[in-house]
Amino acid sequence: MAVTYLLLGANLGDRVATLRRAVDLIAERVGTVVRQSAVYETAPWGVTDQPTFLNQVIAVQTDLSPEETLTRTQAIEQAMGRVRHEKWGARLIDIDILYYDQLVLHTDTLTVPHPYLHQRRFTLVPLAEIAPEFVHPVLLKTTTELTDGLDDNSQVSRYVPGQSA
């Protein structure tokens, strides 16, 4: 049994309902959701001319391999209507594998830990909420240390329904 940390993101449609549905499908198809961060409203990263995102990090206990976890999370994205148009562009749902236990993996289709995890405030803030002492297996720093050392100053705030960042 492994614990994988997944980043969920949505900036099109009913973002709250999309995140809830993604969590439900992950629980059905990937494993037991053991922790969930709050939902955060975040500025776009990479391609900035698009709506703000809602992001959430969840911890999932799974019997699946990292590759099977990727296959199933991508199938969930497709089932929910995700169409890949542009890297870092607007999307209905995005599910990224941040960590898979302490595994370090580089294949043609999957890199774990996520290669941009340590550079993104929208990833680290919700991750720090549920796994502040988790140690990055390559950088050997906790989530809190990575967050404290960030250069990314983009807007990340707890989502309050009816309010926008």
Image (tube, grey):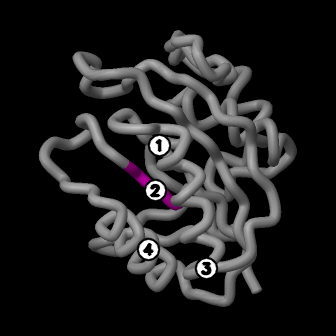
Number of the label disc, if any, that sits on residue 9: 1
**Element type at marker 1?**
strand
Displayed quadrant of residue 129: top right
Q: Classify 107 as above or below 21.
A: below
User: Tag 4: residue type?
Assistant: Leu
Q: Main secondary structure of the magenta part?
A: strand
> Which residue: 67% across, 89% down?
63
**Does the residue at mark 3 contact the one at mark 4 (Cβ under 8 Å)?**
no
- x and y, in percent, of residue 42 in the image: 51, 23
Q: Nearer the viewer, mark 1 or mark 3?
A: 3
Task: Characterize the local packing of mark 4: few (<14), some (14-19) or many (20 or more) Cα atoms within 10 angstroms.
Answer: some
The residue pinned by badge 3 equals 28
Task: Characterize the local packing of mark 2: few (<14), some (14-19) or many (20 or more) Cα atoms within 10 angstroms.
Answer: many
Q: Earlier in the sequence, mark 2 or mark 1?
A: 1
Q: Classify 132 as above or below 161.
A: below
Q: Nearer the viewer, mark 2 or mark 3?
A: 3
Q: Is residue 71 left or right of residue 124?
A: left
Q: Earlier in the sequence, mark 1 or mark 3?
A: 1
Task: Characterize the local packing of mark 1: few (<14), some (14-19) or many (20 or more) Cα atoms within 10 angstroms.
Answer: many
Number of the label disc, if any, that sits on residue 71: none
**Does the residue at mark 2 contact the one at mark 1 (Cβ under 8 Å)?**
yes
> Which residue: 81% across, 45% down?
130
Q: Earlier in the sequence, mark 1 or mark 4?
A: 1
Q: Earlier in the sequence, mark 2 or mark 3?
A: 3
> Over which residues does the magenta segment extend?
93-97
